[in-house]
Amino acid sequence: MLYVTRREIFSASHRLFNPNFSDEENERVFGKCSNPNGHGHNYILEVVVKGEINTQTGYVIDLKLLKQIILETVIRKIDHKNLNVDVDFLIDKIPTAENIAIGIWEQLIDKIPSGKLYSIKIYETENNYVEYKGKA
Ligand code: NI
């Protein structure tokens, strides 16, 4: 079994807050991430596809094709956007790295032409990342 990874970078802003919380609760739970006018990150996205090698091509999936699919399905929607209001697959979600990873998984799961989607990683900072591998 082989695991093939494509990495993409995007920039986006967000504010972490729960509309059901008071201002004080939002401040307590989310701290500076709840700054009312938002803040930005340079996110790293890693998409991993798992599969057997195709003996005709030597590929699990053509990475040029995977790149195109990620650009069209995800990056076009999310790069240089405000994640609280601009992105259809994040509407009504708190735009944490967790929810971004799940949202991107759901965008890509039916679009992988060979192999199977294995994981989505979102690095929000150098030291913090979330990995999603679908519903347990
Ligand atoms: Ni943040």
Image (cartoon, helix red, strand yellow):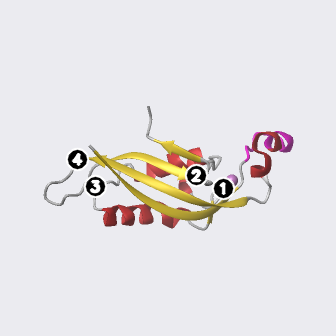
Residue located beneath label 2 in the image: 90
Q: Quadrant of residue 15?
A: bottom right
Residue annotated with mark 4: 52
Q: Secondary structure at mark 4?
A: loop
Q: Which of the 4 quarters of the picture holds residue 41?
A: bottom right
Among the 4 quarters of the image, the one containing residue 39: bottom right
Dot 4: few (<14), some (14–19), or many (≥20) neighbours within 10 Å? some
Q: Which residues are magenta?
A: 17-26
Q: Earlier in the sequence, mark 4 or mark 3?
A: 4
Residue 65 position within the rendered picture, expressed as x and y whole percent measured from the top left: 32, 64
* For residue 11, side relative to residue 19 (left or right): left
Amino acid carrying mark 3 in the image: Pro
Q: Disc 3 to disc 2, how far (Cα)?
A: 24 Å
User: Which mark is first along the chain, 2 or 1?
Assistant: 1
- Is label 3 or label 1 in front? 3
Quadrant housing the N terminus: top left
What number is the disc on residue 84? 1
Kindly identify which numbered label has been placed on residue 113.
3
The residue at 49%/49% (across/down) is 121
Outermost residue on the top side: it is 136
Q: Is mark 1 within 8 Å of ligand 1?
A: no
Q: Amino acid at mark 2?
A: Leu
**How far apart are the two marked residues, 2 and 4, measured between alpha carbons?**
32 Å
Q: Which label number is shown at residue 106?
A: none
Disc nearest the viewer among 2 and 4 = 4
Q: Is residue 23 magenta?
A: yes
Instruction: Tell me: is circle 3 under 8 Å from ligand 1.
Output: no
The answer for how far apart the CA atoms under marks 1 and 2 are is: 7 Å
Q: Who is closer to the viewer here, 51 or 90?
A: 51
Evaluate if marks 1 and 2 touch, with contact meaning CB atoms under 8 Å apart.
yes
User: Disc 3 or 1, which lies upstream in sequence?
Assistant: 1
